[in-house]
Amino acid sequence: MKKHNFSAGPSILPQEVLQKASEAIVNFNGLDLSLIEISHRSKEFIAVMDKAQALVKELLELPEGYSVLFLQGGASTEFLMAPYNLLTVGGKAAYLDTGSWSAKAIKEAKLFGETIVVASSKDKGYNYIPKGYEVPSDADYIHFTSNNTIFGTQLNEFPGGDVLKVVDMSSDIFSRKIDYSQFDVVYAGAQKNMGPAGTTVVIVKDEVLGKSGRQVPSMLDYKTHADKDSMFNTPPVFAIYVSMLTLEWLKSKGGVAAIEKENRAKAALLYNEVDSNPSFVGFAAKEDRSIMNVTFNLTDESLKEKFDALCLEAGISALNGHRSVGGYRASIYNAMSIESVQVLVKAMQDLNK
């Protein structure tokens, strides 16, 4: 039976990517050696790193003056790397609090200096994106999360002002066209829209490197990794290779603009069913709904057993919502086909029969 995997992460990857990756585990590029047993400093792997970095720049249309880093530790490590590298001694950082990951980033930033929360949606369980707030002009940077995986909200407008902008794009990078030149640091764990768990892409404007005035440990210093082209220590070779394959797949589909059309069509189909079906109700405010993570609940919890059985019968996997929200969450990342969304919609419709 075909499985329809709505996992929030690690999440679905294109089948052709999985096939190529599995072949590389046994015999990489005809070397009769596995990808995971060759030197990361071999010309074969350096070519992988170079191509992965080039594809990030091409697909996101990055202007000159940005470095693309492939690091380890997940986006959670970036919660502390960002303030370590950008929050000056005696300075202050501004944060927009829109969910659990924002809150965790704020907690880490407070270890390094004054941290101001400019706005928060915690008062309503993070089901909306705050608006109408001001960013202090004397802040070293403003940090925000572009898409909230758990709660199903997404920023459609980004904070303005002249301060540096740091954005966690872990769950919607490569999903929609954005002018990346407005950001100074972008980071994203690979395991949602780029590849498997194990690497984190960090895009950093070169002019902000080494400016915090802090003595940053080498492994936590963006400049260290930029100067060494992500080869300061042994990189996560397999995760970077699979990310490269996924970016090749995205390019072959027409790039970010083309995938955005597909993503919006999938989201519209699913939200239309949530809104029109009396058995379901959406969690996130309509104007702030994510096109990556669709969160919804049953209007009658007594229907849960029946709906779960319908999903199981249809081959629908990993639909349960996060424990802090409950209900259901359909993560419809780039590799998710509209056919799988149609299967979910049919199961929702069958609940009323």
Image (cartoon, helix red, strand yellow):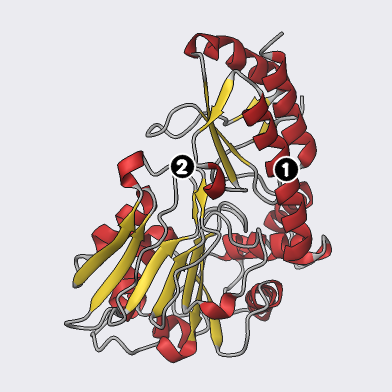
Work out which residue is located at the far front of the displayed protein and give it: 132
Q: Position of residue 26 (x, y in %)?
A: 71, 55
Q: Position of residue 130 (x, y in %)?
A: 40, 55
Q: In the image, what residue occupies the spot 70% across and 59% down?
A: 246
Local crowd size for mark 1, using a 10 Å CA cut-off: few (<14), some (14–19), many (≥20)? many
As displayed, is residue 46 above or below residue 156?
below
Q: Which quarter of the figure has residue 255?
A: bottom right
Residue 266 badge: 1
Q: Position of residue 230 (x, y in %)?
A: 51, 78
Instruction: Indicate the secondary structure of the residue bearing disc 2.
Output: loop
**Nearest the eye: 134 or 202:** 134
Which amino acid type is marked by label 2? Phe
As displayed, is residue 36 above or below residue 265?
below
Residue beneath label 2, please? Answer: 151
**Nearest the eye: 47 or 345:** 345
Q: In the image, what residue occupies the spot 75% across and 46% down?
A: 265
Q: In the image, what residue occupies the spot 19% across and 83% down?
A: 89
